[in-house]
Amino acid sequence: MAHGTVADINDRVTSEPSPIGSGGAEVSITETFENMMLKTELLRGIRALSLEYPSPFQQKVTLPIINGHDIVVNAQSGSGKTIGFVISALQRIDTTKFSCQVLILAPTREAAQHIKNFVDGLSHFMGIKSCALIGGSRMQDTVAALEQGCQLAVGTPGRVLDCVQRILLATDDIRLVVVDGADEISWNGLITFVSDILQSLSKGTQFVLVSPSMPDNVVELTRKFMLKPLRISVWNENSVQLLEEK
């Protein structure tokens, strides 16, 4: 995580100079799940959900997340984004370590539960322990879930921050944070909660942000906490940006 400035880059050859900066970046298209070199147990989970081929989001974004890049993804619901970042998150978990390694933040209880359902389905054969840290549920249930072990946590910003501040959720081993629906989080007035959560994490924690639009305070979040991230627009096949470190 680091401060950065935006440099527009296309993944197609162009003779026109960038209006903001210069550089080069390319996002490869991975057309099958097998070519992503996923864990066997994860592939079984994918097949169990009858997923035959990756969506455009999954083709462009899954491997860059697995490879550790900070990424800003402009994508809407229906793009296969949830399955895409959940597959990446599960692939990144070291199943021999029982501490929390991945944190996924969602704007609403319903969105968090939706993500948790996909985590449960895709990780069915992996033996991974996940938990839901969702506002509006009983705190006793949250504590009980964390006490049972949680390698991947899905939650809403307020409840997750509460768990971090109460030292119920250890953040030392978190290697990846995904913020889904960042624009909606902004509209709900919860960006400061996300910032406080990110501030509590170890230096170098990977940060992936998924949002169809980019309010100013979300852009500021990426500048503060991301290190040379790719910016990928799923609905524009040729749109790629690289945020260059100062």
Image (cartoon, rainbow, N blue to C red):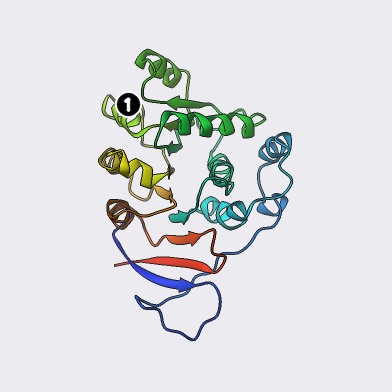
Residue marked by disc 1:
163
Picture layout, residue 164 above or below residue 201: above
Horizontal and vertical percent position of residue 20: 34, 75
Quadrant in which the C terminus appears: bottom left
Total label count? Answer: 1
The outermost residue toward the top is 140
Residue in view at x 27 percent, y 24 percent:
166
Using the image as rendered, state which of residue 165 and residue 10 is in the foreground.
10
Name the secondary structure under disc 1.
helix
Mark 1, residues whose alpha carbon is within 10 Å: few (<14), some, or many (≥20)? Answer: some
State left or right for residue 139 relative to residue 13.
Answer: left
Horizontal and vertical percent position of residue 67: 53, 54
Residue in view at x 58 percent, y 53 percent:
57
Horizontal and vertical percent position of residue 69: 47, 56
Residue in view at x 42 percent, y 66 percent:
242
The outermost residue toward the bottom is 15
Horizontal and vertical percent position of residue 33: 69, 49
Picture layout, residue 144 above or below residue 228: above
Picture layout, residue 153 above or below residue 240: above
Using the image as rendered, state which of residue 122 and residue 82 is in the foreground.
82
Q: What residue type is labelled 1?
A: Cys
